[in-house]
Image (cartoon, rainbow, N blue to C red):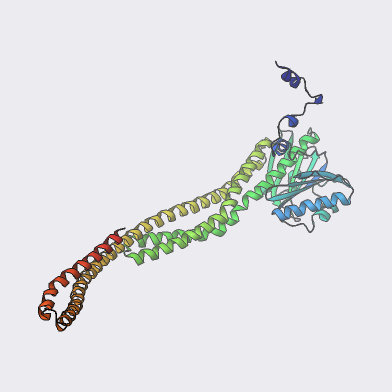
Amino acid sequence: MTGSQGRRGSGKVGGDPFMVERVFPAHEDRAIVLSELHARPFQPVASPRQVFHFALMTDSAGAEAHRAALERLLKLRGLPPMPQGARHHRFSLAGTEIRWEAHAEFTTWGFSVADGKGDPFAGSPPPDVREILEGLPGELVAAVRTTLRHGRKPNSDRVFDAESLCISLVDNGRARALTDLKPDTAGFIRILVEHDTLTPQSAGAVVQRLHEVETYRCLALLGLPLAHRVAGRVREIEQALADVTSRMRSASGLEANRALLEDLARLATEVEALSSLTSYRFSAAAAYTRLVDARLRALDEAATPDAPTIGAFLARRMAPAMRTCESLGARIDDLSAKLSRAANLLRARVDVELESQNRDLLGAMNRRARQQLRLQQTVEGLSVAAVSYYVVGLVGYLAKGGEKAGFALNATLATALAVPVVLAIVWLIVRSIRAHHSDTDGE
């Protein structure tokens, strides 16, 4: 081992304590990766206790408004500020344990208060709940009221609707969770958790997982109303596509095929709009469904002879809804693929028609070019005769002038002899000019 290796192994570098990030530059997301394993820890809940849970859909601006409201509350009450960039925070306020969490598309708030009443769902949320939440942006997705208490009372199920009652033995049978998954008069989904041996940490884990099951269940089912809204339009587009493909079998001619192509383009535009509208919600619904299944597995449910478990109830009710979303998403994708194939076929037919028209046009242009060539040749012949005529006339004038001047010339004979010579010279000149132009055009 070299000396430098020995110093590094000893835990000292230059006399200073060994610090990894002094040796290696840290990745910009290393802190996020390390903290993610410890994100959203379970909040201990001691019995008896009531926990109120709210989940609100928030965009980026809404999420920042919730964060700012929390920061103002902490500052106003003289509480320690939450860490910079934190996505969850919990604190105590006048005996109420408060929990805030920021998620990708929603924000949750939790309020835990001591419960000393006999009725598991008696009373109202503490005043702090309304004070904190009132005026904050967002649309309510889930509102849960969970009561945690010691002992298993024989008639606990009577506070729930018998037709929708679900009972699950959770956490290896150490606790019993009862609910009917129906909102009460105040709008809360009520959950009763009874146990004998749960520690506050274990009880907090059970309560949080039950709240997450309800929250993710509601978020997953948001895809169903959207599926119902667009299903009618999807059927109309499917019928319109069938009509266009039927017309394609008998259509002929460029204009008819172009009209069909325009119809397909319009339908394709509508399908792409539907895909943009639904793809995120449907994929989110599938992801939230998987989260529901994961939380149910974490609860380690066991059945009782009195009622179905929460997981069995949700599987029976959620599965058809999720299949509807999945099926509609697949139909939209299939429509897009069919429209693409039909459009490609029509474009091929239009291209063939255009090539045929171009061939006919080129043939007509060739015929006109040949006619122009013949006309040009005729004009060239006439131009040779015309130019020769004028040149011979000039020669005649010269011959007559020479005869008058006393030269031994016969003007008439000289003019006659000049005719073939002039014709030959003019013809050669015209031919040379045409040959020069042909060479230039070839370049």
Judged left or right of residue 380, residue 224 is right
**x, y percentage for residue 5?**
72, 19
Q: Residue at x 71, y 17 (%)?
A: 2
Q: Residue at x 38, y 64 (%)?
A: 258
Judged left or right of residue 94, residue 256 is left
Extreme front residue here?
Answer: 406
**x, y percentage for residue 349?**
34, 59
Judged left or right of residue 19, residue 277 is left
Image vertical order of residue 378 relative to residue 84, above or below = below
Q: Quadrant of residue 250?
A: bottom left
**x, y percentage for residue 208?**
74, 41
Instruction: Pick the quarter of the image with the C terminus.
Output: bottom left
Depth check, front residue: 118 or 412: 412
Instruction: Count the labels in the image.
Output: 0
**Does residue 123 appear in the picture of this structure?**
no
Q: Quadrant of residue 417?
A: bottom left
**x, y percentage for residue 420?**
13, 72
Depth check, front residue: 181 or 382: 382
Depth check, front residue: 180 or 405: 405
Extreme top residue here?
Answer: 1
Judged left or right of residue 264, residue 356 is left
**Does residue 130 appear in the picture of this structure?**
yes
Instruction: Pick the quarter of the image with the N terminus.
Output: top right
Depth check, front residue: 412 or 357: 412
